[in-house]
Every structure is written in C-alpha cells, then in structure tokens.
Image (cartoon, grey):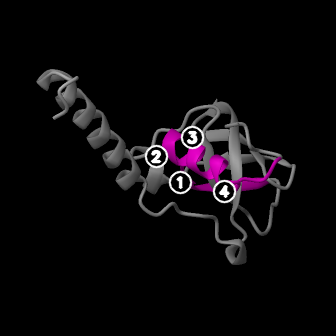
Amino acid sequence: MSPDKTEDEDKDVNVDQDQFNEEEESLGRVILPNKKKGEMFGIVEKMEGASRLSVMCEDGYTRNARIPGRMRKRMWIREKDLVIVKPWEFQPEKADVVYRYTKTQASYLSRNHMLPEVIDIFK
C-alpha cells in the first residue's frame, strides 16, 4: 500500500481490477458464425411477436427469423441485439436464430473488427 492512499482507497482499486478481470474471463471464447453451414451475423430490427422477429443480415437482406423452441425460454432477445441466423435453404427470405450475443460480446466483436460494416452498430 502506498503512503498516499488510505486502506479503503486501495481496496476500491483492487475491487475494480477484479471486476475487470472477471468480465474479460467471462468473454472466454466468442462463438462466430459457421460460414460453411450458411450462418451469418444479424441485427434484430423489430420484434413481431409469436417468437418471430425481423433481422437485418450481413448480406444486406432483411429476413423474417424465428426463435426455435429450444431457445425460446432460455434466451430472451430484444431489438438491437446481435444474433447469428441461418437462412432456410428452401425459403431464403426466412431464417432461424442460432445464437444471441450479450452486449459485452457484441462490443468485443466490434472493437476487434470482426463484424461487417453493414451491421456494426456498436461503434
């Protein structure tokens, strides 16, 4: 402990550093879209109800996406969320949501220039 700081101030600094380290560790490994399977980034534009939403995809198209049953109760999606979508093979204007990023993960991807310019709203 330095003579300029009191014991309380020194503890505050340590707490802040611990929170920062926990945040960095919680990021861990960020999931990226599998291009071989046709997955891509998307931004949720509008919630349409009944587990359906409008998503602006990285290829410039707006698709009607649905939240599959296995994700419906586990993952709550809001407007402006970054998601991974997989367009349907037989109806390319529709898609399934594969994954939703947290705000921390989305800003991490933006900072590291991993998002296409079309959907990078986290600048």
Q: CA distance from mark 2 to mark 3?
A: 7 Å
User: Looking at the image, which residue is at 77% across and 69% down?
Assistant: 89
Q: Earlier in the sequence, mark 3 or mark 1?
A: 3
Based on the displayed image, in which of its 4 quarters is residue 49 positioned?
top right
Find the magenta span and give its range. Answer: 94-117
Q: How many marks?
A: 4
Mark 1 or 4: in front is 4
In the rendered image, residue 79, in percent from the top left (x then y), is placed at 63, 31
Q: CA distance from mark 1 to mark 4?
A: 11 Å
Residues packed near mark 2 inside 10 Å, few (<14), some (14 to 19) or many (20 plus): few
- Which one is nearer the viewer's eye here, 68 or 86? 86
Question: Cβ–Cβ below 8 Å for labels 2 and 3?
Answer: yes
What residue sits right under mark 2 in the picture? 72
| Magenta-colored stretch includes residue 97 | yes
What residue sits right under mark 3 in the picture? 51
Tell me the element at label 2.
helix
Based on the displayed image, in which of its 4 quarters is residue 96 positioned?
bottom right
Q: CA distance from mark 1 to mark 2?
A: 6 Å
Question: Cβ–Cβ below 8 Å for labels 1 and 2?
Answer: yes
What residue sits right under mark 4 in the picture? 85
In the rendered image, residue 98, in percent from the top left (x then y), is placed at 57, 58
- Which one is nearer the viewer's eye here, 57 or 65? 57
User: Looking at the image, which residue is at 71% across and 78% down?
Assistant: 36
The answer, for residue 109, to whether it is visible in the render is yes
- Which one is nearer the viewer's eye here, 120 or 63? 120
Q: Earlier in the sequence, mark 1 or mark 4?
A: 1
Q: Residue placed farthest to the left in the image?
A: 7
Tell me the element at label 4.
strand
Which amino acid, mark 2? Answer: Arg
Q: Earlier in the sequence, mark 3 or mark 4?
A: 3
Q: CA distance from mark 3 to mark 1?
A: 8 Å
Q: Residue placed farthest to the front in the image?
A: 3
